[in-house]
């Protein structure tokens, strides 16, 4: 990759940010684009302490940063610092992609420049599912966990047309808030049901799509799963088990699902596709998805 005096900055903010795969994936994409034409960008990790978020955004504007991704813990707290937020990000309640420019991507088209935010996690989540089948209208989705990623999955399942979307959590207060938080998205609220884990076994036989949106089973906790073998066995034949986690590959959850004869999807493609969608916003051209995928697969193969 060539960095010159004209090179524009992209990046990812988080705290910590050192675990992020985004610099690897985006710089591989930029290096590839430079082989075929102008792509004068570099993508950097920015560890931003929560107390410094406002200063960091002002600093980014001062140095003319083109855009950035957002990871934990800033996905919600950045919203009031932005000039415009897309409808999908408002519904999800979190932003993972920001760009500086006119606000056309977020639907307001005011023509003014400022920080604009959207959320590409739902696009990323949907990409591997759309490759599996077209019609999801009779699907009953069961989402395990009620954190930030779960919110993007709920919005995505609604976009897919799922008949019912259930969300399982362990904290009744957080669950009640989760249910109430969709008040401005009545179509989603009408299809959404929240429940605690003790209600889950009686519902699993109807779940066509079960999504692990908790960190349970993530490296180094690789022998853990949110479902027992017996619970996984309650899912109907033909069900899809989707784990948002991408390290290890496969997770215990997906090993159990494969043993039960279910279709399995892990979180790597979601990571790639949410990144590709962000790159397309910043560069206004198609992202080299296969290059991004290969960069991560090579890295994971080397580090395993
Ligand atoms: P989060 O906001 O912290 O939410 C985690 C959720 O999991 C919360 O509802 C939490 O419950 C629940 N949970 C945590 N430990 C649990 C346990 N032992 N048993 C039952 N529930 C438990 O995290 P997030 O951002 O939603 O991320 C969730 C997972 O998705 C992570 O593994 C993350 O790496 C992955 N992810 C992947 C992608 C991708 O591109 N593939 C994108 C985003 C996230 P409480 O609220 O009660 O604590």
Image (tube, rainbow, N blue to C red):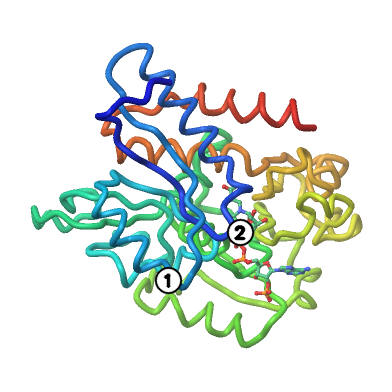
User: Is the shortest distance between ligand 1 and the CB of mark 2 under 8 Å?
Assistant: no
Question: Farthest bottom residue?
Answer: 173
Q: Residue at x 51, y 64 (%)?
A: 151
Chain-order first, disc 1 or disc 2 = 1
Using the image, determine if residue 63 lies above or below residue 90.
above
**Quadrant the C terminus occupies:** top right
Q: Position of residue 58 (x, y in %)?
A: 28, 62
Which labelled disc corresponds to residue 140? 2
Q: In the image, 6: left or right of 203? A: left
Question: Badge 1: few (under 14), some or many (20 or more) residues near its Cα, within 10 Å?
Answer: some
Which labelled disc corresponds to residue 214? none
Q: Which residue is mark 1?
A: 77
Question: Farthest top residue?
Answer: 36
Q: Position of residue 207 (x, y in %)?
A: 69, 58
Find the distance from the CA under tag 1 to the CA under tag 2.
32 Å
Number of callouts: 2
Q: Quadrant of ligand 1?
A: bottom right
Q: Residue at x 84, y 55 (%)?
A: 221
Question: Farthest front residue?
Answer: 5
**Quadrant the N terminus occupies:** top left
């Amino acid at each position: 990759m060539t960095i010159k005096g004209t090179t524009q900055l992209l990046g990812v903010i988080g705290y910590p940010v050192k675990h992020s795969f985004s610099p690897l994936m985006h710089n591989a994409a930029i290096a590839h684009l430079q082989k075929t034409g102008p792509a004068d960008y570099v993508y950097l990790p920015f560890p931003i302490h929560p107390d410094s978020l406002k200063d960091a955004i002002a600093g980014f504007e001062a140095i003319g940063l083109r855009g950035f991704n957002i990871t934990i813990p800033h996905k919600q707290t950045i919203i009031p610092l932005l000039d415009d937020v897309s409808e999908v990000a408002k519904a999800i309640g979190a932003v993972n992609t920001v760009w500086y420019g006119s606000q056309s991507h977020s639907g307001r088209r005011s023509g003014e420049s400022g920080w604009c935010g959207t959320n590409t996690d739902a696009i990323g989540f949907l990409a591997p599912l759309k490759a599996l089948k077209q019609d999801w209208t009779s699907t009953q989705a069961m989402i395990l966990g009620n954190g930030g990623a779960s919110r993007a999955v709920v919005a995505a399942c609604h976009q897919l047309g799922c008949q019912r979307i259930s969300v399982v959590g362990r904290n009744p207060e957080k669950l009640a808030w989760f249910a109430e938080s969709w008040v401005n998205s009545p179509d989603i609220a009408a299809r959404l049901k929240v429940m605690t884990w003790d209600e889950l076994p009686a519902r699993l036989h109807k779940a066509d799509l079960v999504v692990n949106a908790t960190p349970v089973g993530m490296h180094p906790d690789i022998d853990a799963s949110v479902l027992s073998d017996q619970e996984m066995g309650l899912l109907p034949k033909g069900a899809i088990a989707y784990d948002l986690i991408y390290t290890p590959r496969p997770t215990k959850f997906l090993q159990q699902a494969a043993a039960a004869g279910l279709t399995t999807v892990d979180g790597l493609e979601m990571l790639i596709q949410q990144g590709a969608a962000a790159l397309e916003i910043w560069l206004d051209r198609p992202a080299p998805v296969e290059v991004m995928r290969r960069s991560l697969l090579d890295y994971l193969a080397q580090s395993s």
